[in-house]
Image: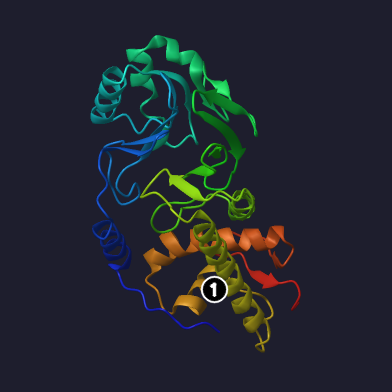
Amino acid sequence: MSTRIPFDESYWEEYLSGQEASLPALPALTQLTPRVTRLLAGNPGVMQLQGTNTYLVGTGASRILIDTGEGRPIWHTMLVEYLREHCLTLEYVLVTHWHGDHVGGIADLIKHSPTLQSRIYKYRPDRGQLPIADGQQFKVAGATVRAVFTPGHAIDHMCFLIEEENALLTGDNVLGHGFAVVQDLTEYMGSLVRMAALGCARGYPAHGAVIDDLPAKMQLYIHHNEARVQQVTAVLAETMRQPGRRGGMTVPEIGRAIYGEVPREIIENAIVPFLSQVLWKLADDRKVGFEPGETTERRWFGLVAR
């Protein structure tokens, strides 16, 4: 059984505030390499870290824009001034996924340049946009960008590989600091393996600093999520060996077995969603089963031990 970790009412607020305070400062605009320029979207926060990273890719007069921030005027003004100052145009606008802090600047782009409407690509496009296919290439002078379908953080998540740099724009799947929030753990863990198999040396995340050693970061993320799964598996296996407990455990019971006595609101708002992802992944792998019921009442059990 794993060590119990005490929680208190202020845990999440203190943790997230501490994470935000410890982040390194990033300049609003910086040329990272001869072909990659990063522009912060001007929206720092607990979930966005220093803000959403957007990227201009290429070396010629036409560039590829990756993501559009959440619609802050400061980002749009900075982008337009940079394009004007360097006599640049946008050939393609590629969106990693549908979340608001990545698509929010699209309206301002189109308002400034209506012709961009026909150059915006997303895996599940909105009206007027174009679809991205897995493996599709986008080329401008100095850069060949290949789309890699990597769902998990979001159902439509795309990463983009810059072939000339052997670098990967990791979107929200892998961050510069900390770990990503996940929608579907089964798909997400598969996407991490696929991303690692690309063998890219460097990562440009949608939040946080450049990842200089992407292979090491990928292994950290993979092992972190494998540990989450193994922890829940171990708790269920241990409990199934106890007399009178072969009927399985509810998610709150699993949470208390791992973390100790946790306030109800943290159980309901944080731990139940977190552990449910792990349990559904284990169910997909046919390692656990469950009995019908509401989310917090449904009983889970290990299939091997049953």
Q: Is residue 222 left or right of residue 59?
A: right
Q: Quadrant of the N terminus?
A: bottom right
Please give the name of the residue rendered at 31% of the width and 43% of the height, measured from the top-left corner.
51
Q: Is residue 15 left or right of residue 148?
A: left
Along the line of sight, which residue is nearer the eye, 113 or 281? 113
Q: Position of residue 294 (x, y in %)?
A: 58, 58
Along the line of sight, which residue is nearer the eye, 179 or 267? 179
Identify the residue under disc 1: 254
Q: Residues within 10 Å of mark 1 (few under 14, many from 20)?
A: many
As helix, strand or loop, the secondary structure at mark 1 comes to: helix
Please give the name of the residue rendered at 45% of the width and 76% of the height, measured from the top-left corner.
259
User: What colouring style does the render use?
Assistant: rainbow
Q: Can residue 156 be seen here?
A: yes
Image vertical order of residue 186 relative to residue 296, above or below: above
Which amino acid, mark 1?
Ile
Please give the name of the residue rendered at 34% of the width and 14% of the height, measured from the top-left corner.
111
Q: Which residue occupies the extreme top position in the image?
A: 115
Q: Is residue 203 left or right of residue 241?
A: left
